[in-house]
Image: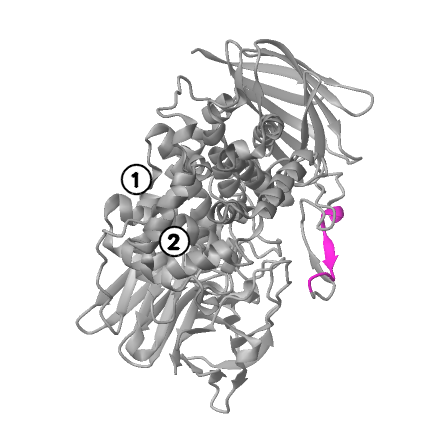
Amino acid sequence: MNMRPLYCLASLLAFSVTAAETLTVSRLEDRADGSKALRFRSDTGLFQMSIFFDAAQFDWESLYRNLTEFNNNNQRTGPWDFDLKTVTPLVPAYWITLDGQKLGLWYAQRPSLEDIANKRFRGRFAFAVNQAGDHLLEFKPYRPFTVTWLSTRLETDPEDQLATNLTPLRPPTSLPAAAFADPAFWKAQRQKLDTTHTLYQKPLQHILTGPLRGSGWDGWPLQVAGYHWNPTNTNALKHLRASVDGVIARPAWGRLQEDAYGYNGDIGGGSILRNMAFAYHMLGDELGAERRALLLKKLALQGDAFLTQTLLMRDYWGGSLLQDHGWRALFDFGTAAMHLWGVIPEADRWVAYVIPRLRRALAAAPPEGNIPGSSYYSIWLYGQNVMWYRDALLARTGEDILEQPALRRLPAFLAAVYDENRRAIYVVENGDKIRVFGSQHLLAAVAAKFRDPVAARLHRLLVESALDPEAHGNHQGEENIATFWGFLTYDPTVPEAPAPSQPVRQLIWYKDAGFVQYRNDEQDVALALRCGPWLGYHSQLLATGPCDMMECRPGMGHFALFVNGEPILMSPDLGYRLDSRTSSILLVDDHGQIGDAGYPMSIPSQPHSGAQVESVRWDPRKNTGVIRLDLKRAYPAALGVTHYTREFHVAPARRVICRDYVVLSKPRRLSWLFQFQKETGGEIEKTGAARVGPLRIIPQPAGFAVTGQIAPSPVVFSYSSKFNKFDHVRFETSAPVESATIDFEMEW
């Protein structure tokens, strides 16, 4: 297809379009009420519009808030893109209509560090044209604000496409959810539980008969299963029917306010879509003919609204391939689409969109099988929504996404970083010591499909601990859900891998992820760090949206050190203000790394600085190793860091050495921080060493002096915080230096 650029000038606006011959654009109209309009002619399909704004006259201070909520003390935070209380946009926002039909409220991207410096906003949205011909886009400001439209581009959607010639291989009756309505299915499950699936007897009886079945909408199928397990409970059926009636009556799925983030979409909207699609099949005729018809009508309306919002919110959850909100919401939409394909005509378009979209997401996912930071290192958040889609897609098309490296290799990664004795994985971020919950469905499926002995062993261990709050960190609802679906997937004939050799001594490096973990159980120590792009080098190339290409801690070189299974040097809560002083890193003249700007939650559209794991060496005969990081590029050029390496030396002794070598363009004062939870306790000894709980940190500078102190780490808490307070050890050069070599011996 020939492509030609089209240019249109309106006022000071430079308008460029690269389009197919079927796309022509006329003049952008400025209207007296402050709104704008754009006329164009096109064929059917998906299109994307990009807008750049000059915001020199915008009220930037309106994006900042002093927080007293969440146990905070009036700390300044920002820039925010939405108001924390109303969840409505603070950045420039417009109501957008296409041919008189409201698409919804669109708003500019969270401003990047570059755009903040240049006083600019930018943003993209996509939309579907369902009929060829002339069309009108209209933009009405959400509220008064002062920006100038600098440049706009309309083009055929460069990211998403609608697949053609898709036909299901099998009918909807092949879906796992459809079996729920068949009494013979439950008879077979009872028989399995008494014979081949005795592993599940205790947790499944708890799940199907206990008061707590599952958390939120994700647990709704367990309510259905509980009814089918005991079909004489007519009150259960009344409750299920009433919950469906309540959802049908809701004016929107997700947030109810039309101007709120997540209206008719995001995780909330996606989970309701999935579960109401489940309901149609799981309860079958027991819903009643009238209710089933009303439910399908509502599902058609909400599915179309969800797809519209997904396209509109391209720079937020809608365009995020891997970030948690987009990842989970779109896999739920895919599950709903698979369940309604061939049931209602609207689902044909959903399927045409979501199959290629989710293939893109899986292709961008970490290929080493590691659980990314975008899912908070949680296999539940990363894997469970994917598994519902996997089961439905496999049933309808025969395609099995478990063959994708990101999912196929996940059990091997989990086994490598999982401490079976302490029932946790050791990472860096989100508390560092992560309890594993909600994994049984994925592990059972990988074990069954590939006869994977590692997945089979992990699966058994995690089923056996499914009712133990200490093992899963009080996530009983999520455990119930994954355990139930794991039961339906379990193949008891898969042999297990043997237990790992004890004591575990290892130094492992996931090169793409930039993740390193050292563990020596004989010395009661583990060390974990991540140095590289937030989601890894592979994902950085394929997931480039503003909410995928982010940085969540300006702290390359930061690490967690575990003694006796607990993080002693650890990762403070990221909260609502990113600050280098909450990482175990080097400060230069009291300045931190690139991105040390106090941004809340994460820095959007932030390319990786270039800091990296340079090498990892391990001698398994001597149990010695060296981890070497190149950190020079993590710092702004103005600080003059011309060389900076950090090394960790490990050996079969109750000691780890952190060795820094820094060269600067001119003498500067250097400070080294080591983070810990306040309740652990910290003090500077008379010798100059620091004591943190069971750990001593002994500075050994080469040719210069350092002084030590204990100081509070400036955490601004968020809604998800545990509200723990953090301190840090700070060792500082007594005078400016031009180069420095220093060892920190950490012994316990």
Q: Is mark 1 on a helix, strand or loop?
A: helix
Q: Position of residue 244 (x, y in %)?
A: 62, 38
Q: Name the residue under label 2.
A: 440
Q: Nearer the viewer, residue 275 or 324?
A: 275
Going by the image, does 152 lie left or right of 357? right
Q: Can residue 291 be seen in this view?
A: yes
Q: What element carries label 2?
A: helix
Highlighted range, magenta: 61-70
Residue name at image x 44 percent, y 11 percent = 2
Q: Is residue 410 visible?
A: no
**Screen quadrant of the N terminus:** top left
**Screen quadrant of the C terminus:** bottom left
Disc 2 marks which amino acid?
Gln
Q: Mark 1 points at which residue?
A: 403
Mark-to-mark CA distance, 1 and 2: 18 Å
The type of colouring in the image is: one colour
Task: Tell me: residue 535, above or below residue 108.
Answer: below
Going by the image, does 191 lie left or right of 68? left
Disc 1 marks which amino acid?
Glu
Among the 4 quarters of the image, the one containing residue 25: top right
Residue name at image x 47 percent, y 90 percent = 687
Q: Nearer the viewer, residue 541 or 663?
A: 541
Q: What crowding class fits label 1: few (fewer than 14 Cα within 10 Å), some (14-19), or many (20 or more)?
A: few
